[in-house]
Image: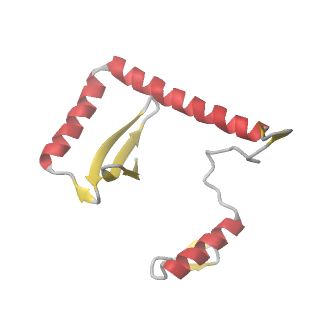
């Protein structure tokens, strides 16, 4: 289970996602950082019930998710192999793996510096590679 927050034309939306072996379902839980009212919650629960009770719709949703993932990988592959910019193809990315959560030491150091400068109270104290704050 995880949360996702994104900006839309109607404001920010926070969703709670539950992932199973077969698919992933998301439920809107907040709009502009405000919890949904009872009527909105009922609407979201109704939509989830509808999906669960209509296996054909759930299969279509899974197929759309797979198409989206396949399209993303085709785009990444094209960027990796190279795009012609008026001459020989130029690879615009060097590494297209998107499932890794690992960050380089350089990236972590840069992020910690930026967060420490902009939000000094939010950065936990780190000692010997372990979070203690």
**Residue 123, x across and y down, in percent:** 50, 77
Does the image show residue 124?
Answer: no
Could you say where residue 86 lies in the image, as x and y percent from the top left? 81, 39
In this view, which residue lies farthest toward the top? 56
Task: Decide which of 62, 124 is in the foreground and name it.
Answer: 62
**Which residue is located at x 31 percent, y 42 percent?**
27
Task: From this view, report whether residue 90 is shown above or below residue 46.
Answer: below
Query: Which residue is painted at 68% across and 44% down in the image?
Result: 97
Figure coloring: secondary structure
**Could you say which quadrant of the image residue 46 lies in?**
top left
In this rendering, is residue 110 above or below 95?
A: below
Q: Residue 53, can we see it?
A: yes
Q: Residue furthest right?
A: 88
Identify which residue is drawn at 38% across, 41% down: 18
Left or right of 90, for residue 43: left
Residue 2: x and y in percent read 41, 50
Instruction: Give the x, y percent position of residue 41.
Output: 19, 44
Question: Seen in the image, is 8 located left or right of residue 40?
Answer: right
Q: Nearer the viewer, residue 73 or 84?
A: 84
Residue drawn at the location 22% of the way across and 56% of the way down: 35
Which residue is at the front of the view, 102 or 98?
98
Number of marks drawn: 0
């Amino acid at each position: 289970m995880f949360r996702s927050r994104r900006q839309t034309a109607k404001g920010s939306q926070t969703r709670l996602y539950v992932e199973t072996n077969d698919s992933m379902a998301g439920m809107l839980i907040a709009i502009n950082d405000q919890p949904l009212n009872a009527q909105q919650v009922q609407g979201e629960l109704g939509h989830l019930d509808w999906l669960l009770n209509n296996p054909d719709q759930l299969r279509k949703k899974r197929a759309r998710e797979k198409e989206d993932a396949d399209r993303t990988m085709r785009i990444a592959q094209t960027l990796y192999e190279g795009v012609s910019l008026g001459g020989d193809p130029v690879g615009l990315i060097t590494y297209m793996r998107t499932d890794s959560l690992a960050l380089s030491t350089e990236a972590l150091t840069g992020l910690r510096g930026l967060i420490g400068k902009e939000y000094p109270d939010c950065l936990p104290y780190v000692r010997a590679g372990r979070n203690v704050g």
